[in-house]
Amino acid sequence: MAKRDYYETLGVSADFSEGDLKKAYRRLAMKCHPDRNPGDADAEARFKELSEAYEVLSDPEKRAAYDRYGHEAFEGGMGGSGGGFHEGSASFSDIFGDVFGDIFGGAGPGGGRSSVQRGSDLRYTLDLSLEEAVFGVEKTIRVPRLTECDTCQGSGAKPGSSPKTCQTCNGQGQVRMQQGFFAIQQTCPRCHGQGKMVTDPCGDCRGQGRREETKTLSVKIPAGVDTGDRVRLSGEGEAGVNGGSAGDLYVQVNVKAHRIFTRDGKDLYCEVPISFTDAALGGELEVPTLDGRVKLKVPDGTQTGKLFRVRAKGVKPVRGGAQGDLLCRVMVETPVNLTSKQRELLEELHQTLNHKTHAPKREGWFDSVKSFFDEMKF
């Protein structure tokens, strides 16, 4: 059966760059890698076909031979490339470790690990007032983070130079130590598993490939958020290493305490002080809400602690649903700093009150106390 054209297999053009080739190989090989398709013979065959195409096109000598002679360059020894594709070859190990180390989180057949690493995610705590959380707001924040060095483009090497293959591990990232019958494989102590070393470091980032900067960002906070909610800004975390993707920034909301309202889910609560006479005679009160004032009717004989519900004056949940309510708890204030005339009037009122008629809760409570003591055995 005739083999497919290597360029067609990987879906790249004849003038591809090294980055284009790796990206195409990574995307296609992830879909049919044997670890993700156990027992699928077609996927395994497709993966081998992709790997074979990548090995040839990523090697300048093999690619030149292929462009000149096609597949025959590796079947009859033509082109001086020294034989065909071997799954166990060192070049295949390099390909596997370089491209798949960051995908599957492990080492390739050569034992090395990929030096490409995704940047770290960051968290930023944003304090909001209750009004900002309820109605939504756009905030400007300043976030310190590691970004790719503009001078060396993240390589860590001085412009005009490039990282060199580690001579200790020959670019594998790990070294093998033989002790009698036992062989131990360890992370290379010289390059720390990277496989490459910067011998002439960039002066701006000191060979790290990244440097710290503070970035100003605009964050849109949706209406209805509450403490603990997070807004994700994709790609605004720390820069990756050696071309890895940037991490994300998570803006975590913290709603500050309000001097009037407290929040419980989508409902708001507030305490409304009323006078002794308003509680006894009833009346109309003006109470605040987050978007204005409303009238609250208080019936006569209102007791302290009674809750009055004002519909749809709470919070519209960020995830949808009906708007919450405002619940007003009235607190009856006892008069203080009375004049002699006011005290005289209250004493006169007190003489006219019938506790069974005018204070039923008080009378019922004392009856319960009396029964409690009568039933006790000393």
Image (spheres, helix red, strand yellow):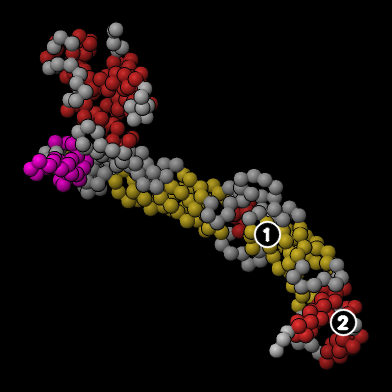
Residue sitting farthest toward the right: 352
How busy is the neighbourhood of tag 2: few (under 14 within 10 Å), some, or many (20 plus)? Answer: few
Q: Tell me how many marks there are.
A: 2
Write the residue at 36% across / 47% down. 120
**What segment is highlighted magenta in the picture?**
170-194
Which numbered disc covers residue 268? 1
Counting from the top left corner in percent of width and height, residue 155 is at 24, 40
Residue sitting farthest toward the bottom: 340
User: Magenta stretch: residue 195 in it?
Assistant: no
Write the residue at 79% across / 76% down. 275
* Residue 253 sits above or below residue 273 on the image: above
Residue 292 visible from this viewpoint: yes
- Quadrant of res 170: top left
Tell me the CA gap for discs 1 and 2: 36 Å
Residue 13 visible from this viewpoint: no
- Going by the numbered disc 2, the residue's amino acid type is His
Q: Nearer the viewer, residue 17 or 255?
A: 255
Residue receiving disc 2: 355
Q: Is residue 147 left or right of residue 286?
A: left
- Quadrant of res 300: bottom right
